Image (spheres, rainbow, N blue to C red):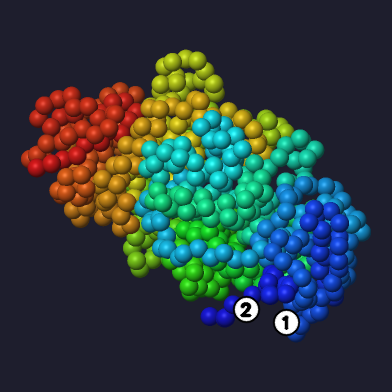
Amino acid sequence: MTKIPARRGGVELTATGAVFSLWSHHGTAATLCLFDQAGRREALRIPMEQDEDGVFRCYAQGVREGALYGYRVDGDYAPHEGLWFDPAKLLIDPYATAIDRPFVYDAKLGTFGADTAALVPKCVVTADRPVERQPPFFKPGGLIYEVSVKAFTQCHLDVPENLRGTVAALAHPAVIAHLKRIGVDAIELMPVVAWIDERHLQTLGLTNAWGYNPVAFMPLEPRLCPGGMAELRDTVAALHREGIGVILDLVFNHTGEGDRFGPTLSFRGIDNPCLYRHMPGRPGALVNDSGTGNTVACDHPYIRRLIVDSLRHFVLNAGIDGFRFDLATILFRNHAGFNPHSELLEAIRHDEALADRILIAEPWDIGPGGYQLGNFPEPFLEWNDRARDGMRRYWRGDLNMTGPLATILAGSSDVFSNRPEARTRSVNFLAAHDGFTLMDLVSYERKHNEANGERNRDGHSENLSWNNGVEGATARTQVLEHRRRDVMALLSTLFVSRGTVMLTMGDEAGRSQRGNNNAYCQDNEITWFDWSSVDDRIVEHTGFLAALRKRFPALAEPGFFIGDGDAEWVSPSGEAMTPEDWEDPDGSAFGLLIASRDMETGLDSKLAALFNRSQQPCGFLLADGGRYIPLGQDAAQKRGGGGVVVPARSVAFYVWTA
């Protein structure tokens, strides 16, 4: 393994001042710019000297924590050759850990020769404040709850108004009570690192609501986390006290500088040829594997070091339990393609602060060979879109779905059995931030993204969805009940699947985005969680399902169901599934009997999950020398002698005891 280079940037405070460091291979000169405490007046410029490793350094006497700064880098300006040096541009330090204000897009940010000191946030000098090191509070197999920080609490009336929409609100007792009610083991925060809006949103009068458009990798978004790292650290500690872990969704695959017409904010003005990937033989043409205009060169030694240092920053200073990597294939691609044993991965795995952290890959991008589900090595868990689609297809009523669903429930061995450890690495989910909410999945056959200003052309067109007879909002009681029933059946299916389980915020409560499946630019009521319209029946069902996974730990174990005493697949007759049962294209009912310790009684038992996707109740026979006790809302014993009736469009649960 090639040794990852030493840290090549940032600010080191000393007893009398601070040392500033900035790496650039192609830059010919660099200047530190210090600002007054308001961040408006450039108070001092200090030339920096470059060493043999390409690091520019300078010492600033009297600088203390809280000082504001930025950089200017000089060199050739030749965009067709990939060179964008412009000393008029104030640049964000790639190693900045805080900024003094949010980014605001302005056309001058991309105009050569236009001074941008008045437009760009200033980096803030900070000091590390390490937390006590603890093992991760989350273990694979648990429940992850994906949260958009602002949208989650913006409308929560029990949260003080000044805290709503912030990271601090996540530590409020009312919010924690909801998380515990539905059995959350870890929350996964959508990006909280500072971002800039995409330039086209300004003309549409819209703003970025998701945050997947960072400029640097460490500074927190001032609008979400006005208290900076202390606010994040205190919130993590509060959640940890309740046994809830915190996972950060981080974006290392691209930056908000976008394509060649975008703003010059940091990487582009520091060393565009090294820090972004370019088309072979075309140094001025940016690779766009991210779909956002640029692709960070994650195979470059400087970027590898920066990513590792960013992860360490959040673990050491906030106690973060793990990370989800957006478009993770990009992080492990080099000139030859995807490399699951890249130097970056090895550096993470062997770093003492990172080796035990939870790592989750979104295992795809739009680049060549970009779909890599099942190919990420230990210790990565992977978002499993095949499981998502299979569960949707089954409940939509697609033909020949019994076998595929059973494979998903058993841990997706068709995807994850390519490693000697023979256990699932799947993160199973029904919906995520990108796409329909779970309620919209059963309420809309088509996307409705008109509010995005792109004439409904954006977002996925095939969502494997259905509307229960009416497209969108309706007052018809029967339609609403059928939608609730389908949501509960989908949730039951998700929670009985082996692997890690993920819910996106509000799916446990019937949240709708009005059919918008690409709501990244809707920082408004479309995405905000409406706590006044929570569906308590779905919430209660979700809590029951989470408790079920804890009561029967076999559900969360990582091994695949192989049928050797660990699980049985049965038809409604109570007999083992036959080839004819598996191959029946219209198959609408089957049962999964899972051997597990019952943590409530301490006895060995069987958990029966009985699936009925038809529109009619279905009888099952479950006689097995003992008795089956119904569990949850949809389980009701209807017949004697081991016979039960499973309601239409539901999953019923029973526990067997001798």
**Quarter-wise, where is residue 6 in the image?**
bottom right
Apparent side of residue 197 relative to residue 578 in the rendered image (left or right) = right
Please, what secondary structure does the residue beneath circle 1 have? loop
Q: Which residue is mark 1?
A: 53
Q: Residues within 10 Å of mark 2 (few under 14, many from 20)?
A: few
**Looking at the image, which is closer to me, 404 or 499?**
499
Residue 307 coordinates in the image, percent (x, y): 60, 66
Q: Residue at x 45, y 21 (%)?
A: 480
Q: Which mark is residue 146?
A: none
Apparent side of residue 410 relative to residue 265 in the rendered image (left or right) = left
Three-letter amino acid code of the residue under disc 2? Pro
Outermost residue to the top: 476
Q: Is residue 567 visible?
A: yes
Apparent side of residue 539 relative to residue 113 in the rendered image (left or right) = left
Residue 303 coordinates in the image, percent (x, y): 65, 69
Q: Which residue is mark 2?
A: 5
**Looking at the image, which is closer to me, 632 or 102?**
102
**Quarter-wise, where is residue 654 in the image?**
top left
Outermost residue to the right: 113
Q: Residue at x 27, y 32 (%)?
A: 632
